[in-house]
């Protein structure tokens, strides 16, 4: 759902779905960061920082 909303340039909805998830994994973080990267670059950097603070490991997609 996060990826779908991000691809539709609906980042408010993508972020809402992301926040409602009980746990965030690398796939959900990458979907959120990727959506922000295409639509709101500064928010992508902030999401990346939050991912690092949460301790989620990065991969080649990140």
Image (spheres, rainbow, N blue to C red):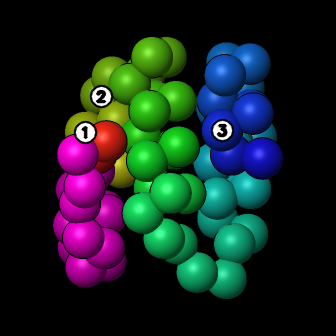
Q: Relative to 49, does residue 38 appear above or below in the rendering?
A: above
User: Looking at the rendering, in which quadrant would you find the C terminus?
Assistant: top left
Residue shown at the point (53%, 43%) measured from the top left:
31
Mark 1 and mark 2: span between their CA atoms?
Answer: 5 Å
Q: Is residue 8 above or below residue 4?
A: above
Q: Quadrant of residue 45?
A: top left
Please tell me which residue is depicted at 66% across the width and 38% down the height of the picture. Answer: 3
- Where is 59 relative to 46, above or below? below
Identify the mark nearer the N-term, 3 or 2.
Answer: 3
37, 57: nearer the viewer: 57
| Mark 1 burial class by Cα count in 10 Å: few <14, some 14-19, many 20+ | some
Q: Earlier in the sequence, mark 3 or mark 1?
A: 3
**Residue 54 seen by the camera:** yes
Judge whether residue 8 is colored magenta.
no
Q: Between marks 3 and 1, how big is the CA–CA gap?
A: 17 Å
Say if mark 1 contacts mark 2, CB within 8 Å: yes
Q: Which residue is mark 1?
A: 45
Viewer-nearest of discs 3 and 2? 3
Residue 46 visible (yes or no): no
Residue at label 3?
3
Q: Nearer the viewer, mark 3 or mark 1?
A: 3
Which residue is painted at 44% across and 33% down in the image?
34
Q: How many marks?
A: 3
- Location of residue 56 in the rendering, given as x and y in whole percent from the top left corner: 31, 73
Measuring from the top left, give residue 2's x and y in whole percent.
Answer: 68, 45
Q: Which residues are magenta?
A: 48-60
Q: Which mark is residue 42?
A: 2
Q: Position of residue 18 (x, y in %)?
A: 64, 59
Report helix, strand or loop for mark 3.
helix
Element at badge 2?
helix
Instruction: Tell which residue pokes out farthest to the front in this image.
Output: 60
| Residue neighbourhood size for the residue with mark 3, other residues' Cα within 10 Å, grouped as few (<14), some (14–19), many (≥20) | many
């Amino acid at each position: 759902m996060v990826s779908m909303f991000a691809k539709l340039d609906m980042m408010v909805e993508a972020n809402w779905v992301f926040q409602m998830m009980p746990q965030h994994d690398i796939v959900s973080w990458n979907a959120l960061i990727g959506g922000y990267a295409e639509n709101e670059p500064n928010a992508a950097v902030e999401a990346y920082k939050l991912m690092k603070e949460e301790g989620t490991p990065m991969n080649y997609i990140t």
